[in-house]
Amino acid sequence: MLSYQHHYHAGNAADVHKHAVLGWMLAYLTAKPKPLSYIETHAGRGLYDLGDPAAQRTGEAAAGIGRLEQALAADHPYRRCLDATRATHGPSAYPGSPLIAAQALRPGDRLHLAELHHGEHAALTTALAPFPARIRREDGFAMAHATCPPMPRRGVLLVDPSYEVKADYDSIPGHFARLHRKWNVGILVLWYPILVSGAHGPMLDALGAAFPDGLRHEVGFAAAREGHRMTGSGLFVVNPPYGLAEEAARLSAVFEAKG
């Protein structure tokens, strides 16, 4: 896990899927005056430069945000966040999910982030310096269990591991069950890769059995390069907010139209 650095993959098609859904959910939640909490277990560095050689080396951003951005409505919350990030940090800047959340939240909302990698944690601290975030360098699941139920109780928890630790597939359903027992009103969001190996399958079977009313949304796309094992992106949402199924269907149409 400590070897993973997302800047090689920032802005890829999976990021577009995950961040478009997250942006929509936060816009929906912040449209009401009640305060909320945002918790993220594997935050990364929060801000990426798609012009960096590390990002360009894989070609994933070109196949992701470069191909899909214009297919999203100009007033989509995710597009607004992209515009704001570029206006502040330059045209090749790309916001990770912590920065998307930080831009969406209001005074009175709470932002809890965990990132274990030393370099990524330092970069995250710098990127989020203008925002009142609580950033911890510790295991994300430990932080989530210690924080839940948060105050305010209304809110979202995003789990977005690298899955370099293969045990994540086995342990995540148990983490979600425990977190839901402690925070039964929280929106719990899991991102997962669609893999040629099908390694994600048993995890999703367990989540579906535990949360039969959860929303599962997946999009497919071409492998980023020859031999790449990820051919799609998935989200599993416990307590999905009203209207998310319709937003997910709109995103499916975007990905299908772009082939």
Image: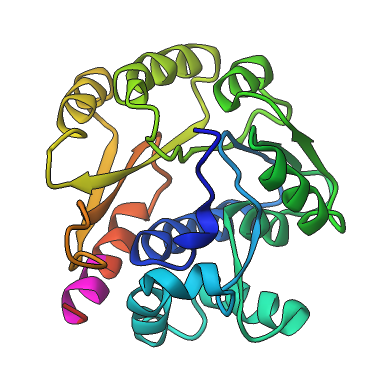
Q: Is residue 131 above or below residue 153?
A: below
Q: In the image, residue 123 lies at what x, y percent?
A: 74, 52
Question: Can you say whether 210 is above or below 195 in the image?
Answer: above
Let me know if residue 255 is in the magenta part.
Answer: yes
Q: Nearer the viewer, residue 255 or 94?
A: 94
Residue 67 in the figure: left or right of residue 197? right
- Magenta segment boundaries in residue numbering: 252-257
Q: Is residue 35 visible?
A: no
| Most foreground residue, 152 or 103 | 103
Report whether 60 appears left or right of 215: right
Residue 99 at least partly seen:
yes
* Residue 155 locus on image (x, y percent): 60, 38
Asked where in the image residue 73 lies, by quadrant, the reply is: bottom left
On whether residue 223 falls in the magenta region, the answer is no
Q: In the image, residue 152 lies at what x, y percent?
A: 72, 31
Residue drawn 52% across and 30% down? 186
Residue at 21% in and 47% down: 194
Is residue 215 found left or right of 180 in the rendered image?
left
